[in-house]
Amino acid sequence: MATTQEVWYVRLPDGRVIRSRNTVSLRYHLRRGRISPGCQVRRSPGEDWRAMTDVEELADAVQSAVARRQKLLNGRLTTPALIRSRAQFQEKRLLGVRGLVGELLDALDSTMNRIKLGVASLLGMLGAVGWITWQLLPAELGSWWTVGATAWAVLLLLVACLGISFVSKFTALEVAKMRQPRAGELWPSVFGHAVRLAAALVLVVGSGTALFLCLRWLPEWMLAQASPESTWWQWGASAMLIVRLILEVIFWPVIALAPLLISPILVVQDCTFHSGIQQWWRLLRQHLGRIFLYEAFATMLGALFAVPLLVTVALAYWSLGTSPPIVGQATIYVLVGIALTPLIAYLLVANVFIYLNLRYEYFHSAR
C-alpha cells in the first residue's frame, strides 16, 4: 500500500509536534486512543494543518476513536478486544522491530551534526578529566579527600547533565520542528532540564549503588558472625551472595539506562524529576525487553564508528611502553574520551528516537 510509506506530522493540542512514520501507524494510535481525534495533521512542512476529520484516510479511524472514548465514558469498554481481521493484524505488525531499525537509522542521520558531535566530544573529555582527577585527588588533598571528591563529583555531574540535556533538547526540537533549533529555543530550558536530570540521577543511580554496596557488605558481616558450632550464618551468607550476584546482573544494566532514557522524558514531557522517574520506571516495567533490544542495537551501531578511533589510541598507548609517564597516561585518557565521541553522541540522539518510538509507536503483540 502506498499509504504505508507516507510520513505524517501530528500537532498535539498542547502545541507539540510528533511524527508518525505512516498512515497505518497513525490510524492504529487513533483507534487506541493514544492520539486525540482533535489533533491536526499534515504530510510536509509546506502544507497547512488540517483537522483529522477532514482527511479521508483517517476519517474511519477518527470515528472509531470517538466511539471508543464514548464507551470508556459510559463504562462499557473493559478489556481490549481480540484482533478480528488480517488488516488490524497488519497494522500492529508494522509497528515492530523493523520500524525500530528505521528509527535508529534516522537517529544516525541526526547524529551527524557538528554541534552534537562537539558536545559529545566535550562530554568524553569531561569523563577523562574526571577519571584523571579521581586518581590524583587522594594524594593531593589528603584529609580533605572526602570534601574535595564530593564537590568535584557534583560539579562533573551538573556539567555532564547540561551536555546530555542540550543534545536531547536539540534532537527533540529538530524532530518536532523539522529544522535546526535556534539558540533562543534551547537555552531558556536546558539549564532547568540539567538540574532535574542531575536530581533524578542522584536518586536513581545513587540509591541503586547504595543498595548494591550494602548487599556486598552484608555477606562479609554475616560470615564474621558465624562460629564453628553454627553453620546458619555461613548458609545465610552464601544465599545472600547468590542473591546479590543475580540482582547485580539484572539491575546494573537498568541503572545504566537511567541517564539515557530519563533525559528524553524530561525534555519531551517537560515534567518534574519525580514525574520523570515515575515515567521512566513505567517504561522499564512495560517494555524492558524491547528497551534492552533497542539499546543493544544502538550500542552496536555507535561502537562501529568508535572502534577505528579507539584502535589508533590503543596503538599510541602501546608505543609508550610498559611504564608510561603520568602525562602520557593523562593524554591517552583524554584521547579515549574524544575517540568515544561517535558512541556518546549516537546513544544520546538514539534514545530520543527510542523514547518517541516507545511512547507513540509501541507494538502490541497479538497474543
Image: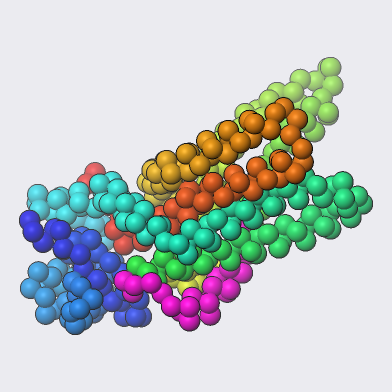
Q: How is the image coloured?
A: rainbow
Nearer to us in this view, 284 or 303: 303
Residue 180 belongs to magenta span: yes
Name the magenta segment's main secondary structure: helix
Query: Is there any visible trace of residue 294 in the rendered image?
Result: yes
Q: Position of residue 51 (x, y in %)?
A: 18, 81
Left or right of residue 323: residue 44: left
Residue 211 visible in this rendered orientation of the protein: no
Residue beneath the point at 70% across and 23% down: 235
Determine which quarter of the picture holds residue 170. bottom left
Name above or below for residue 83 compared with residue 251. below
For the N terminus, give its image quadrant: bottom left
Residue 129: x and y in percent read 69, 52
Q: Residue farthest to the right?
A: 143
Residue at image point 47% right, 64% down: 115
Which image quadrant: the C terminus? top left
Q: What residue is rendered at 39% in x and 44% in y?
A: 301
Quadrant hosting residue 10: bottom left
| Residues in magenta, as a range | 177-201
The part of the image, by quadrant, that contains residue 70 is: bottom left
Residue 252 spot, x, y in % from top left: 57, 42
Camera-nearest residue between 19 and 214: 19
- What is the number of callouts on the image? 0
Whether residue 7 is in magenta: the answer is no
Q: Is residue 9 left or right of residue 298?
A: left
Q: Is residue 58 above or below residue 185?
A: above
As drawn, 69 above or below 29: below
Q: Nearer the viewer, residue 172 or 330?
A: 330
Q: Residue at x 9, y 49 (%)?
A: 86
Which of 267 and 139 lies nearest the eye of the viewer?
139
